[in-house]
Amino acid sequence: MPSRPTAQPDLIWSDSTEPDQVAPTNRASKIVAHSGTSVEVSPGIIELLLSPSMAADTLPPLIAAQLNHLLSNSPLPIKVDQIRSGCKSAQYPDRFTLLIPFCLDFIKWDFIFNALYPSVAPDVVFSPEDADFCPLDVEGGYASTVVKNSLVDWNSKDSTRLLALVHGLRDSYLNYQKKRIGELDDARLKFEINTVFSREGIEVCMVPGPDRPEEVKFAVPLLDTDLNKLVLGCPWKTEQKIYLQVVFPVIRTYSSTQTAPRLKLVSSSDLKSLLSIEDVKLPPWLDGMCMAEYLPTLEDNLNLQVVESVASIGARRRFIEALAPHFGRPLEADPVFCRKATVAAVSGTFNFLVSFSFSTQFPRQQPTLTLQSCQHFTSQGAPLASSPINDYPWSPRWDASQMAERIFDFLVDECLNFKKHCQDTQQG
Amino acid sequence: MADELPPFDKISIPGPVLAAILHSCSSSSGDSDGLLFGRAVPLPPHEPVDDVTPAPSPFPTLAAIITSHLPSASPTSFFDPLGHVDPNSPFLCCSSPSPGSHLIGWFSARRRSPLRPSMRERAVSLSMFKTVIQDSTDLHPRPSVFLLLSSSASANQALHAHVEYWQAFVIRPGGALEPRSVSIINVGPAFRGQYGAYIPESPLPWIPWELKRGDDEEGERWSLNGLRQVVHEQQLLDASTEGFEIERLGMLVGHRAAECTSEVENLYKKMLVKLKGLAWQVEESNARVLEQENCNLELRKKLAGLE
């Protein structure tokens, strides 16, 4: 059985320590449909659509309008994959796969329209592991009236319909997962569901896997505060959230020692510029604990970290401002999160740039410096740069101007070493 | 009682019937669906095993044989967007199966999509199972077979690699669709038994007579037109049997038959000529049907705002 799609490098929820990613909105491109409306799709789709045989293809206007409205108005970062055609000539694309965020992962659903019969409501093929999910079956207990209403009087000219259908189906799917877990013969899971499910936005799903023991995953949104409002001039388009992922093993037989669940903090990717979620230490899960006991401690702890991270932005800003008396005004600086700044410096006739890169732990962690020559280049024409430097004298207790002064003093000597290194490299 | 009926254990389909279904799906301009007809046949009882024997079922194990199909003219013609089958829809009511077969299920063909039942297909299968109860003495009077056809979702259209896939399912009374393998009945020693039992059938295509009647009911001209039509059809039939009068054929039977070799050869030659004429007519009418279909497709594209 194929497994649930695993985290891909460009997933929003990916929390690995990768180099800074380009924001998803920049990566998406626009495809202009017949009527002049546009649809955002991922780069893979462009290749597909622009392959020689598909070059003439564009989404029919009515379907394009539905998809466009969904992508631009859904609060969830939904992605489109594999746009394809059901026509004999493969001329009019009318079916696509949607990657819908659910429980800190994505569910892949195929939406099938009919280009030749736009008045016919679309149909959906769900993931292979959800073979018994049937939201139209009233007896299933999770049928949604939103889904029914949007299908019964489907109006292809009303571009909001697909959005309503997708969200209705997703709600129905959450109820389906909840029902599946409620039917498991596991007392602890039943208790957890009954105690924490009143929290707003909580999601839960069964983790499939034929070669693994059965597990149940909870995605618990933490902190009620709107993180977007904490940062001045915040550029985030979607609401940023921190989640606790709790994975319980399914234990059907009674045992006196309960296995602790696997815990992990996950944040939406934009939050990385404010707070590195991997650095947050999780409080220990004590024997016999339940989520309702664990969450308040964790939230208090996390709240402190968030306040500290916001304070760190101020510290970084003051430091960047303190660079000006020594180096002159910075050439460039990150104005919102103050994670990067570059200044120009001169030593005799040697011109070079100094880049400062700040971690979210500033001032506890000193900034990483990189020197780049303005006069020495590699054979490919790229400017010569030093390796990252962070072994210079530093104390978090110094005030901003003293930090800047000490770095200036350090660079007075260090730039001579760098100049020599540049000359050696270029001659060699 | 029907709710307790066990689902089919096996599904068989004669090669020509499968070929006809595949052809009608692959030649359709978009997604298509339609009805499947066939009959249930009892399977021989299982070999007894030494292990724990389950309680024997009071029902015989059954196999479904699909004998014909009927594509619908437009998608979702016999069910609504929620997948509820309308047992009174003209398509379901007027599709008269050939003797010995009845409505056994339905099929859905959709290109470049996963080979798994969709949300609506599951609902239609269940609704059809629950609402269509046929007045039949058959072993399994409820339609419970679902045949899903798809084609490769290959992104590389340039290769024209077009692979058809199909998967058959049977509906359980609880609503779950269980996949079943399909055995294709073919000519050969392995299929001798089945081949011997195969009844060739060629049902006439369904014509929506109801619409026609509605238009003509008012005037008296209907009867006159109808009579003219009958006379015209009779003339056509007479023309095709010309030269094969019953008296002439009667001469070939009896004690004088041995003397009539030349007569038989003469009749045979005439028959060949007639067959050739018939084949030519079929070819011509097919070309006109295709022309009309293309014309309809163009209109449909305009209606759908594609051009």
Image (cartoon, helix red, strand yellow):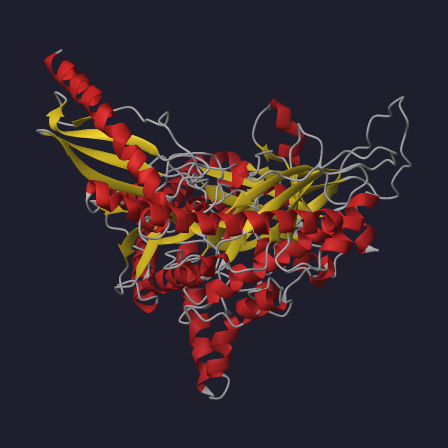
Q: Residue at x 37, y 39 (%)?
A: A358
Q: Residue furthest bottom?
A: B219
Q: Residue furthest left?
A: A349
Quarter of the image with the C terminus of chain A in it:
top left
Quarter of the image with the N terminus of chain A in it:
top right
Image quarter of residue A4: top right
State left or right for residue A183 relative to residue B289.
right
Q: Residue at x 54, y 66 (%)?
A: A151
Image quarter of residue A70: bottom left
Q: Residue at x 89, y 37 (%)?
A: B56
Residue A45 visible somewhere in the drawing: no
Image quarter of residue A148: bottom right
Q: Vertical placement of B58 versus B173: above or below?
A: above
State left or right for residue B125 relative to residue B72.
right
- Looking at this view, is B46 or A94 the one in front? A94
Residue A354 visible somewhere in the drawing: yes
- Looking at this view, is A215 or B24 the one in front? A215
Q: Give the image location of residue A371, x and y in percent.
A: 23, 29
Q: Give the image location of residue A221, x and y in percent.
A: 60, 53
